[in-house]
Image (cartoon, helix red, strand yellow):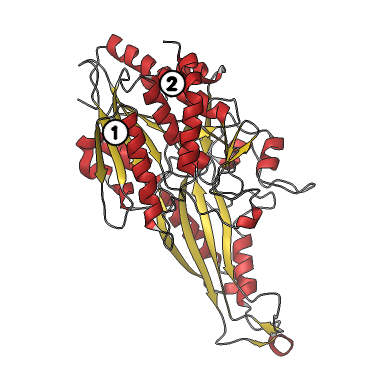
Amino acid sequence: MDLAATVDSLMDRLTADLAKLAEIPSIAFPGYPESEVHRAHDLLVELLRDAGVEHIERIDLPDTSPVIYAEIPPPTPDAPTVLLYGHYDVQPPGDESLWKSAPFEPTPIEGGLRARGIADDKSNVMAHIGMLRAYGGRPPTGIKIVLEGQEEYGSAFDDYPPTDARRFACDAMVIADMGNLRPGTPTLTTGLRGVAEVVVEVRTLAEARHSGEFGGAAPDALLALIQALASLHDPAGDVTVEGLRREPWDGASYTEEEFRSLATVRDGMPLIGTGSLGERLWSGPAVTVIGMDTPTVDGAASAVVPYARAKLNLRVHPLQDPKEATDALVRHLREHKPFGIELTVTPSDAGPGFEPATDGPAYRAARTALREGWGEEAQFAASGGSIPLVNGLAKAVPQAEVLLFGAQDSMCNLHAPNERVLFSELRGAVIAEAAFLREYAAGFRAAGGGGGAR
């Protein structure tokens, strides 16, 4: 089969179905209509059946949008089974005045479409559909399809796979909730940072007191909090918390110009931290102040502040235990005691990172496949974001190789206004996924078969 020619013949219909899916505001956050999430679910079931999938189930868990589970049996006893993952829910659109067109009206742009969720993750869901269409519903491997409906908000499904391990048994997984470092650069994501959040509180006075009468001696809660937060970084911007893992990054990364554009850094503003961008973004820690409760500037009184608090977001090396990292941050803050003032430090839930092994047969097949999809050698990169379900799947099937690639790219504005997908990336992802199944099946048979799906 000429995969490229086959996929090219499918693109018009595939992009039309992607637009139809992107029109549905399938937001699984509280306060949004559940009916829209169910409408997206039903459309995908219809598209899977049309693509030749006969066995389709629905997994219902408490307080969780329905999960689509589907299977295609292996074509021969010596063929492997590959699990394909994606999610059909999307982020809320945010401030719609910042969008160039209505978030749920897919709008043509040069080389693609703009809409909320069209890249994250509906393009990747449609890449799975495209692969099935390319093979006429009969791919060269067994297939298990998992399409989640509440990934963006989080749900009980994150921890479900280990409780039903036989259902998810496979030899390799394609986690299609990722994409390329830049358009046209095929990328395998080989690291996801772990995450935790911590709240820091300072109480110093029973109530505010006149800054003229008491300032200079009365303990200022806001000043103490600022001192504590300032202790988290050195003058260059590197994290000073002992016990947080940091290693050099030897994979691909952004250029500084690309990063400045992606992060919307103002002209003349320096980047913080030292070392390569990959080290700062992926293989080292980051502590970000994501919120503060303090008096507002407008209407502020001339008074010593009695109470202040801040919420910190901690991102850690993919292989560091997030509880260990959280404990290190908590310990640092509690021991700091600015001006001798004790801080109340409260950690919340932490999520682990992930770093897959990259030396197995599935990765060898994937590198060949991504080269076929995009015409370039595949690069290894990482992500500062997290996909909690990946760890659940890896625990359920620990021997399966885990591949993260897809139709998104780092410049698609996921979770931001004016999210877009490029047709070139969708085309490449469909070709790459189809080629991966072909290459992996051939290598698997040559090696004598046997694996996680047995």
Residue density around tag 1, few if under 14, some if 14–19, many if 20 or more, within 10 Å: some
Picture coordinates of residue 375, whole percent (x, y): 56, 16
Horizontally, residue 358 falls left or right of residue 75, namely right
Check the image and report above or below for 83 versus 210.
above
- In the foreground, 54 or 75: 54
Seen in the image, is 10 located left or right of residue 221? left
Q: Is residue 304 above or below residue 377?
A: below
Location of residue 263 (image quadrant): top right
- Which structural element holds mark 1? loop
Q: Residue at x 33, y 51 (%)?
A: 65
Pointer 2 local density, CA inside 10 Å: few below 14, some 14–19, many at least 20: many
**Viewer-nearest residue: 358 or 169:** 169
Amino acid type of disc 1? Pro
The residue labelled by disc 1 is 398
Residue at 51% in and 27% down: 12
Write down the residue under mark 2.
366
Name the residue located 31 percent from the left edge and 17 percent from the top edge. Answer: 140
Q: Please report whichever mark, 2 or 1, sits nearer to the chain's N-terminal start.
A: 2
Q: CA distance from mark 2 to mark 1?
A: 19 Å
Q: Is residue 350 above or below residue 439?
A: below
The answer to whether one can see residue 196 in this image is yes
Query: Does the residue at mark 2 contact the one at mark 1 (Cβ under 8 Å)?
Result: no
Amino acid type at mark 2: Ala
Could you tell me residue 349's position as x and y percent? 40, 57
The image shows residue 74, relative to residue 259, as above or below, that is above
Picture coordinates of residue 67, whole percent (x, y): 31, 45
Q: State the image coordinates of residue 341 (x, y, percent, origin top left).
A: 56, 74
* Rendering quarter of residue 454: top left
The answer to whether residue 251 shows anywhere in this view is: no
